[in-house]
Image (cartoon, helix red, strand yellow):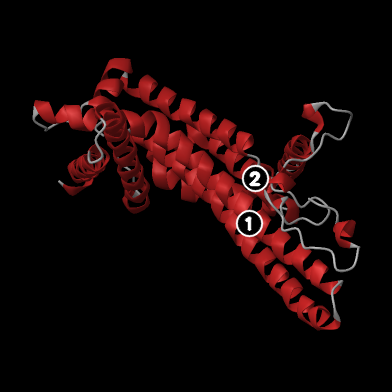
Amino acid sequence: MATQNPREGALYSILGYMLSGLIFWGGVGYFADRFFNTSFLTLVGLLVGMGGALYLVWLRFGR
Amino acid sequence: MRALSAFSAKGEEFIPPSSKDFVLPPIFGDNAFTTKPIFLIGLSVILISVFFVLSARKAAIVPSKFQFAGELVYGFVRKDLGEEILGHEFKRFMPYLFSLFTFILVNNIFGIVPFIQFPTFSRISFAYVLGIITFIVFHYVGVRKQGTVKYVKDILFMPGVPKPVYILLTPIEIATYLIVRPLTISLRLFANMFAGHLLLMIFILGGEHLLQGAIGLKLVSPFAFAFGIALTFFEFLVQCLQAYIFTLLTALYIAGGLADEH
C-alpha cells in the first residue's frame, strides 16, 4: 500500500490479514474435523492460517 | 429507549437495558419505514445540507463565523484524510469522503443530543449499508485504475512467492478483500455505537432506579448520574473518533486500489 500514512494503513491491513487467515483456514480445519471425525484439524487450520497471514504481512510490509 | 417512568413502582426489580431497547417501534402504524432511526437519518441529511449550503452560500474572502465553521470541517477532512492518504488524486474522492465523515459524525452525535439520544448506527443495517458502499467504491476505483485483470491478479497473487504457496495465501487474500474488510469496517462502527449507548443507558437508568429506592440507595444515585454524565463526554469522543476511523479506512482502501504495486 503506497500510502503517505503507512503506519495507520499497515496497522489495519495487518489486522485484516490476521483475521482472514484465522477465519478461512480455521474454518477449513473445523469442517475437515467434522468430516473426518477428528479433533485436531481445527488447531492445525488455525496455525496454518496464522502462519499464512504472518507470511503475507511480511511479504507486504516486511521486505 | 425505555421511558424513565417505567421504574415508578417502588421496590420494583431493576430491568437492565438490553439489545431489545434498540428495537424501536414504528411511529406511524406498523410501517417499518417510520421508525426513529429512519427519521434520524433524514434529519441528519437535512441538518448537514442546510449547514453546509448556508456556510458556503455567501462565501467571502473574509469568512463569516458560519463559513469558518464549515471550512474548518471541510479543511480537516481534506487535509488529514484526503491529501495525506490519497496523494495528488484526492480531489476526486473528496465528495464521498466528506459526505461520509459528516454523515457518520452527525448520526453518531445524535446519541448524546438531548431528546434525540439515539445513535443511528447502533442499528447494524445502517452500518452495513455504509460498509457495502465503501466496498463498492474501493473495488471500482481499483478496477478502473489498473484494469480488471491486473487488479484481480494483484490481489490474488502476491508477487515473489513460490507457486505452491499460493494455495495457502490466495484464500486469505480473497477473504480479506471480499469479506473481512467490509465486515470489520461496518462492525467497528456498529459495535462502538451500540456499546456506548448501552453504557449510557445503564448508568442513567440505573441512577434513576436508585433514586426510587431506600434512602441509602438515594444517596448513591448521584454518583451513578455523575458517571453517566462523564461517560457522555467520553461517548462524544468515541463518536467523533469512529466517524474519523470509518472515513480513514475508506480512504486507505481507496489508496490501496490506486497504488500500482500493492
Give me the C-alpha separation between circle 1 and circle 2. Answer: 9 Å
Q: Is residue B130 above or below residue B220?
A: above
Q: Is residue B73 above or below residue B28?
A: below
On the same chain: label 1 and label 2? yes
- Lower sequence index among marks 1 and 2: 2
Amino acid type of the residue tagged 2 in the rendering:
Ser
Q: Which residue is mark 1?
A: B196
Say which element carries label 1.
helix
The residue drawn where x is 70% and y is 62% is: B202
Nearer the observer, B247 or A20: A20
For the residues bearing labels 1 and 2, Cβ distance under 8 angstroms: yes
**Residue B49 at x, y percent in the picture:** 73, 38
- Say which quadrant the C terminus of chain B sits in: top left
Amino acid type of the residue tagged 1 in the rendering:
Gly
Nearer the observer, A52 or B117: A52
Q: Which residue is mark 2?
A: B122
Say which element carries label 2.
helix
**Residue B223 at x, y percent in the picture:** 73, 78
